[in-house]
Amino acid sequence: MSKTQNTAGTVTVDGVAYDWHLQREPHESDDEGWKGMTIALVAHDAKRAAWVEFPAPKRLLKGLPRGRLQLDDATIARCVRAALSAGWEPMSRGKPMVFTVDAQGN
């Protein structure tokens, strides 16, 4: 299980291919404090995306240098499964659905 610096890719979960890309880096919001990174998930030939929000890394909360979680295929696959179990229907129409996961993507 190697960690990569990729900001986009494709992962297959239960026989369905999902494209993903980094939607937003961790950043500090004036009204909400530190927000974690967000990735966008889209199934091939689907109409509705899912945005998966990670918590802000603890190092940012402690004032340490900025950085983001390292994304690998296993983490992205856990994000896809978490979004699907929370009610994401990729073939439905509409705005992207937003889901919050933990640092491991669950």
Image (cartoon, rainbow, N blue to C red):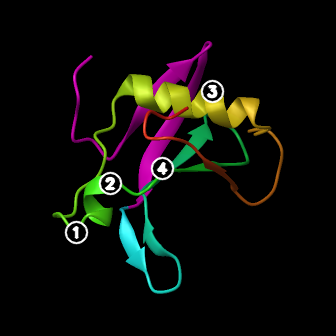
**Residue 78: percent from the left, percent from the top?**
53, 27
Residue at the image point whose x is 53% and y is 85% from the top: 31
- For the record, the magenta segment spans 1-24
Q: For residue 20, which numbered disc appears in the image? A: none
| N-terminal label among 1 and 4 | 4
- Residue 63's disc number: 1
- In the image, taking residue 60 as reference, residue 54 lies left or right, namely right
Q: How many C-alpha atoms fall within 10 Å of the one at disc 3: few (<14), some, or many (≥20)?
A: some
Residues at marks 4 and 2 touching, judged by CB atoms closer than 8 Å: no
N-term mark: 3 or 2: 2
For marks 1 and 2, give the CA distance: 9 Å
Position of residue 72 in the picture relative to residue 45 (left or right): left
Within the magenta stretch, is there residue 14? yes
Q: Which-is-in-front pick, marks 1 and 4?
A: 1
Which one is closest to the eye, mark 1 or mark 3? 1
Please tell me whether mark 3 or mark 2 is closer to you in this view. Answer: 2
Say which amino acid is labelled 1: Gly
State the mark number for residue 54: 4
Front residue of 40/100: it is 100
Q: Nearer the viewer, mark 3 or mark 4?
A: 4
Q: Secondary structure at mark 2?
A: helix
The secondary structure that most of the magenta stretch takes on is strand
Q: Where is residue 101 drawn, in percent x and y?
A: 56, 42
